Image (cartoon, helix red, strand yellow):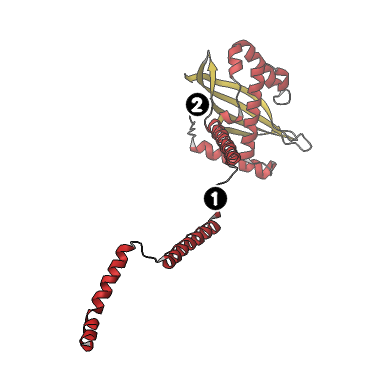
Amino acid sequence: MLASTKVFVRACWPIATRFATLAGVENNRYPIRSPEILTCNITCKRSITSIHEEFTRNFRAFDPRRDLKNVSLHNSQRQGHFLKNLSRNFLFRHDKDIPKKRKKRIPKLILLQNPFTWIMIKIDFCVLRRVWDPEFQEKEFKFGTRQAISRVTQIISQGQYGDLNGLLTKAARSSLVRELDRNWSEKQRSLIALKRDDIQISSPRKVYFIKIGDKRFCDIDMAFLALKWAPINSIEALLFAEIFARFHREYTPHSIPEWTIAYFKVTRFEILRR
């Protein structure tokens, strides 16, 4: 009997253990596992704290600044200075690049000269340079004659005929003043003033070699063509001028080495276009 009882107990013991466990669960619905739960909570709290500390330590640049008001004021001042300088530069370039008054274009003059006359003049200049004046240069001579003609026209425009002394010979000065008084109006005199750049063409016409006893002279006839814009009755007009002049120089030894105007005449002066 005792043996059968032991066998029965061994067979039913697992079932009894399961029921006892279920009964314990029903009586205590919240099983005591506080050590594991506390350990888990502590671990989670430590990990979040460490992450937060690491984030704040590595990314301090993203922390909000306390002087936002001063920073915004400083940035606004810098932007204001930048825009102010930008507007100044833009306005300066705008005023510089766009002229207030557009300058009218002046047409270019073309002179067709007789080739035989051109060759003869080149030969005469070569003779003058080799025989009488080794320092003579045609280019420099033309430049000086343009300056002289420009100066004479400006003196005529200003009416200061006394300044013609030294530029014209005595006979040429008397002849020019007489012609201006007889044939030129005050308006024409004021318009005849030419700048050196207004004279587009200076063309030699003829070269003279003169000997009187021991004295030597050279005369060169020159023609000048000029164009310029000038206001006439509040209207811009294109003026054309053709001037003939004879330049005289004495090549006698110990004489003054300078060219003077022995004859001056405005052959054409008219309005081409308005």
> Extreme bottom residue here?
3
Q: Residue 77: x, y in percent?
A: 59, 37
Quarter of the rendering containing residue 152? top right
* Amino acid type of the residue that numbered disc 2 sits on in the rendered structure: Lys
Q: Residue at x 45, y 64 (%)?
A: 38
Label 2 and label 1: CA atoms lie apart by 66 Å
* Residue labelled with disc 1: 63
Instruction: Judge from the rendering whether residue 224 lies leftward or rightward of residue 159; answer left or right.
Output: left
Q: Residue at x 61, y 30 (%)?
A: 196
Q: Secondary structure at mark 1?
A: loop
User: Is there CB contact under 8 Å for labels 2 and 1?
Assistant: no
Q: Secondary structure at mark 2?
A: loop
Is residue 201 shown to the viewer in this render?
Answer: no
Q: Residue 250: x, y in percent?
A: 72, 33
* Residue labelled with disc 2: 104
Tag 2: Cα neighbours inside 10 Å, few (<14), some, or many (≥20)? few
Judge whether 17 appears above or below 56 on screen.
below
Instruction: Judge from the rendering whether residue 202 lies leftward or rightward of residue 33; answer left or right.
Output: right
Residue nearest the viewer, comparing 209 with 181: 181
Q: Residue 24: x, y in percent?
A: 31, 67
Residue nearest the viewer, comparing 88 with 93: 88
* Amino acid type of the residue that numbered disc 1 sits on in the rendered structure: Asp
Between circles 2 and 1, the one closer to the viewer is 1
Judge whether 78 appears above or below 235 on screen.
below
Quarter of the rendering containing residue 147? top right
Q: Which comes before the other along the chain, label 2 or label 1? A: 1
Q: Residue 212: x, y in percent?
A: 72, 32
